[in-house]
Amino acid sequence: MAKRLSYTRRDHASSPDIHCRMMHEKFHTPAPVPVNIYPGNNSLAAEIDTLSLYDHNTKHPCPTPSPTPVSSHFSHGTSTFLTTTQPLSPSPAVPVAVITLPLSAKIPRIYAATKIATRHKAVDPLEPSFNRAMAIRDRMSLFLEHASPLAVDVAKRAVAGAGIVDPAREIGLLVVVTSTGFIAPGVDVAVLRGLGLSSSVGRVVISFMGCAAAMNGIRTGADYAIAHAQDEIGGQRKGKKALVVCVELSSVNGVFKQTMNDVIISSLFGDGCAAVVVGAADASAVQNGDLAPGSIVLRGSFSQLVDGTDDGIILGVNHDGITCDLSPKLPGYIKLAVGPAIELVLEGYGLRKKDIGLWAIHPGGPKIIEESLASLGLSDEVASVSWEMLSRFGNMLSVSLPFVLQKMAGDVVKNGGKTGVAFSFGPGITVEGVVFDVVA
């Protein structure tokens, strides 16, 4: 069985039900791109029918110098997570003045180092009515207020793009992925009601798995689709499908404390949403070349928990919001872990790095991309799509990697089919990803 995945993005101005007053960029809406995914060693495989993307647009919440053009990422690797200087060893006869800049003076430099030109937010943190001291309960209500219509809108377009006529009968599992909002009844119930799904549909909420959580959601949907590939719908063995919705609204958790960690996360994270319909089809469609151009054929998925890195990414809940603590050691952890983990995965498929033409690296920040490349011994050019998505959208947690895959699938249609690896990072730290092929 195989799966098909198509992507659509809509301009913000056409969605009056979502608060987005600070829009300053418009996007061309691409034609839907079909993407098929299947585990190559199974007789059945999950099929991702439709992935629909949506995002909000706002300016940086702190003063930001003119961003470096994304093309500069491909010619040098000078951006850093935090800018530091090496200690000097001056002559004893020469006095040295040590100047410590206040945190506020470092903010423009930190924001410039992110290489992010625009981000998208459901809530404007500069709006006077936004209470940065609001309690966690109020923030979660704010999350539900904005995330629910957003998720419903995106899910509807995903279902329509998949050609589903009767969602109540054809969708048997709903998976909601988020690390930025927790409230029940929540987004899952809103999507169920908004799409008219069956009240008996299975529901799974994947939370606090961070940037890598889309991989977990798709894996869960794929397992369901394979298990239910022979289910009857209207007297035909069409198989039931899973709907996976990733929605991340970091903006509702904005506190803007005067700490280095808070400045960093405020400079990186943006809001977004992606919806995926996962179904099943016969694997012979892959073997016979029946898949549409742009299809992504999934050979399999992988997960690797890296020992000794528990402090790398820590997600928590405070009285005033959900928090993310990023260790200064995180880039080093990534550099040490990615190469060995990916090489082991590729070995299991009889592949080497030279066989991989597409590298979908989570665009979590410059150091995330740079240290992943360094660990794999790859050049900046192979991560051009990840750099582009980082510049345009920032780090959208679980939503980011689908944006990278969308762009890659469209490019491959023009340039020829290739084998690829997609991966992201979650708390632990954990490396989560998939090995895939794109049909030209």
Image (cartoon, rainbow, N blue to C red):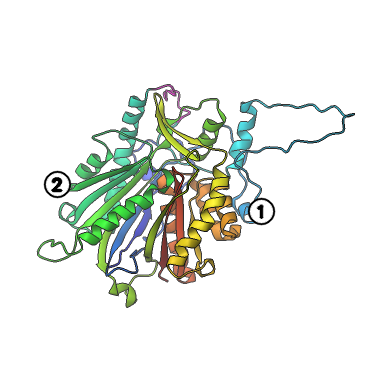
- Mark 1 or mark 2: name the one nearer the start of the chain: 1
Amino acid tagged 2: Ser
Q: Name the element at disc 1.
A: loop
Residue with the mark numbered 1: 76
Where does the image place residue 392, in percent across and percent down from the top left? 51, 48
Q: Residue at x 29, y 71 (%)?
A: 283
Residue 27 vs residue 424, the one in the foreground: 424
Say which quarter of the image contains residue 251: top left
Residue with the mark numbered 2: 200
Q: Residue at x 35, y 46 (%)?
A: 246
- The numbered disc on residue 333 is none
Q: Where is 328 relative to 75, above or below? A: above
Of the 4 image quadrants, the one containing the N terminus is: bottom left
Q: Name the element at disc 2.
A: loop
Considering every residue shown, the one lying at the far left of the view is 235
Residue 126 is inside the magenta segment: yes
Residue 160 vs residue 361, the one in the foreground: 361
Q: Magenta stretch?
A: 125-134
Q: Is residue 137 left or right of residue 271?
A: left
Of the 4 image quadrants, the one containing the C terminus is: bottom left
Residue 359 visible in image = no
Residue 419 vs residue 209, the one in the foreground: 209
Q: What is the distance, in whole Å, between disc 1 and disc 2 at their CAs?
A: 54 Å
- Chief secondary structure of the magenta span? loop
Q: Where is 385 relative to 438, above or below? A: above
Where does the image place residue 391, in percent across and percent down from the top left? 54, 48
Residue 311 is inside the magenta segment: no
Where does the image place residue 222, in percent across and percent down from the top left? 29, 58
Say which quarter of the image contains residue 148: top left
Q: Is residue 75 left or right of residue 235?
A: right
Amino acid tagged 1: His
Q: Residue at x 52, y 57 (%)?
A: 340
